[in-house]
């Protein structure tokens, strides 16, 4: 069964691609700028005995997304059955300093890409009466974060989108769920100042950052064929940060 993981050249996307491959899914890797790491990942994935290839596309551009899905179908000879909308960026700034470009870059890459990719994937999934869509949101989309109004809005948007599409396609064998990671050790969090990291760590009941693999395990759960009765859910993978 073919899975597409957007933004899988590194970080959480890479761990998701590997976890799916280890569990017998063929994997289409998508990257924007890091072709070298995408190629390396593709070789690694093939060692698990599944099919894989890597595709350059800026998923914030609807034309590139159209071409991406066409290229994947041509290459694998079948449509995507598992879509993981993972590609994401941050452009943090306090509201009064936030430029339109920073707002738009984050909304385009995180939220609009999720719409473009889902829109391209859904017709074939509905035809097959089977599909799994897993959207990578964030706990910031649930509780907000100063300096991340653009990012929080994009992730809260993804959660609303997830629930709406889950309702629209529930009767078509397609489940749509979101994962809300907390504080995960990747390039995205590497750039935070040590004092910011320390204060976040204090707010995590489990007492440590999560790993990309922690998120990947949750993706595998939603991707499995057996999990057909869970849809429209948001699963926090956050060491207990947002429990209530
Ligand atoms: P990361 O290490 O910065 O990696 C981001 C990935 O997204 C890269 O593979 C990058 O590809 C890709 N990407 C960025 N813009 C793209 C575009 N326009 N088109 C295609 N691919 C694009 O980030 P991460 O921490 O793994 O985050 C992955 C997802 O988890 C994001 O949606 C993020 O918001 C979410 N998340 C992360 C955390 C965390 O603590 N790390 C917490 C909550 C949610 P290139 O390198 O090729 O450009």
Image: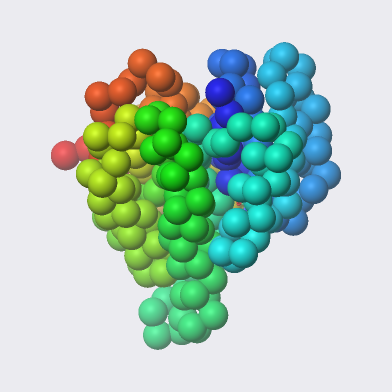
* Front one among 65 and 88: 65
* Quadrant of the image occupied by residue 59: bottom right
For the C terminus, the quadrant is top left
x, y percentage for residue 181?
Answer: 41, 41
Colouring scheme applied when the structure was drawn: rainbow
Asked if residue 109 is positioned above or below residue 38 in the image, the reply reads: below
x, y percentage for residue 20?
Answer: 56, 24
Residue 89 lies left or right of residue 231; in this view the side is right
Q: Residue at x 39, y 62 (%)?
A: 154
Residue 113 lies left or right of residue 143; in this view the side is right
- Looking at the image, can residue 47 be seen? yes
Asked if residue 123 is positioned above or below residue 1 in the image, the reply reads: below
* Front one among 76 and 115: 76
Q: Residue at x 71, y 40 (%)?
A: 74
x, y percentage for residue 49?
Answer: 72, 14
Q: Residue at x 26, y 46 (%)?
A: 168
* Quadrant of the image occupied by residue 203: top left
For the N terminus, the quadrant is top right
């Amino acid at each position: 069964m073919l899975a597409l993981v957007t933004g899988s050249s590194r970080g959480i996307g890479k761990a998701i691609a590997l976890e799916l491959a280890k569990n017998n899914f063929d994997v289409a890797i998508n990257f924007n700028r890091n072709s070298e790491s995408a190629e390396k990942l593709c070789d690694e994935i093939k060692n698990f005995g599944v099919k894989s290839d890597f595709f350059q596309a800026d998923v914030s551009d609807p034309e590139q997304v159209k071409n991406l899905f066409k290229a994947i179908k041509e290459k694998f000879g079948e449509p995507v059955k598992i879509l993981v909308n993972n590609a994401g960026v941050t452009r943090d700034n306090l509201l009064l300093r936030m430029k339109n470009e920073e707002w738009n870059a984050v909304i385009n890459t995180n939220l609009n890409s999720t719409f473009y990719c889902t829109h391209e994937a859904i017709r074939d999934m509905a035809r097959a009466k089977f599909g799994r869509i897993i959207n990578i949101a964030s706990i910031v989309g649930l509780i907000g974060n100063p300096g991340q109004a653009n990012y929080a809005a994009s992730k809260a948007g993804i959660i609303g989108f997830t629930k709406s599409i889950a309702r629209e396609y529930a009767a078509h064998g397609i489940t749509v769920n979101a994962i809300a990671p907390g504080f995960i050790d990747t390039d995205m969090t590497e750039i935070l100042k040590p004092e910011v990291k320390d204060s976040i760590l204090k707010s995590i009941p489990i007492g440590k950052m999560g790993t990309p693999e922690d998120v990947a395990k949750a993706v595998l759960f939603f991707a499995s064929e057996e999990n057909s009765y869970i849809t429209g859910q948001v699963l926090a993978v956050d060491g207990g940060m947002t429990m209530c």
